Image (cartoon, grey):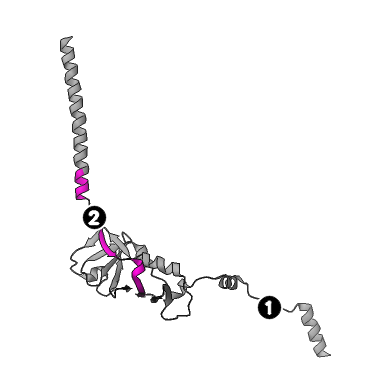
Amino acid sequence: MKKKRIQLIVLIIICLLSIGAYFLVKHLDLSETEETAPEAAVVTDFSSGEVKSLSVTGAHTLNFVKEDDTWYNADDREMNLDQTEISALINNIDHITTDTVVETPENLAEYGLDNPAGTITAVLENGSSVILHVGNKNDITGDYYVRLEGNSQVYAVSSYIVTAFDREAADFIEETPETTEESSEAPAETETETPAESSEETASAEN
């Protein structure tokens, strides 16, 4: 009996040691993961409310300015712009982060940034500018390569950040009930002569 009791105690001790070792290893793995997990790089970090002008070059050109908290199209100030749409556009670039950074790119041409396809420029109230150069699209990830003016690093950012700006100024016109009704109205039907009416007119002309 005494021998069996000693064996049981040994087994219990072994089990406790195994459990303790398991949790210790798991804790070390988590600590290592937390320490080695890369932090997201900050590409831009400014308040959208600070932006006083926004311009875009490339496939489409946009040129918006804000005066007295109202956005206007600098090229056509009579255009009634959807203020919410422009605010949403700026929200795409005010806080950009990414996990993919090329610290020292050897050749900007590899990323399409030697001659950028377009630029996005936000001018802030303090007079500073945030200029984002847009390069090639990564066909594998779908991300776009971008570079900040004055910064040599190349970043890969989500495609929606770039494609959101691929629009014309007319796309930002605010829809009103009047414009909606006009666009939904069907064109007036043109009257056509029936064969009988045509025959009567011909006979009348002969007489």
Q: At x 76% / y 78%, what residue is drawn? A: 195
Numbered range of the magenta stretch: 31-59
Give the residue at the far top of this rendering: 1
- The percent position of residue 9, horizontal first and vertical second, equals 18, 18
Left or right? Give the position of 49 relative to 110. right
Q: Please identify, in this view, whether the residue under mark 2 or under mark 1 is nearer the observer.
A: 2
Which sits in the foreground, 186 or 14? 14
Where residue 126 is drawn, which disc sits there? Answer: none
Q: At x 46% / y 72%, what residue is drawn? A: 172
> Helix, strand or loop at disc 1?
loop
Q: At x 31% / y 59%, what residue is drawn? A: 141
* Vertical comparison of 134 with 13: above or below: below
Would you name the residue on which mark 1 appears?
190
- The amino acid pointed to by label 1 is Thr
- The percent position of residue 3, horizontal first and vertical second, equals 15, 12
Quarter of image, res 90: bottom left
Task: Give the CA separation, mark 2 to mark 1.
Answer: 67 Å
Task: Locate the C terminus by quadrant.
Answer: bottom right
Magenta stretch encompasses residue 50: yes
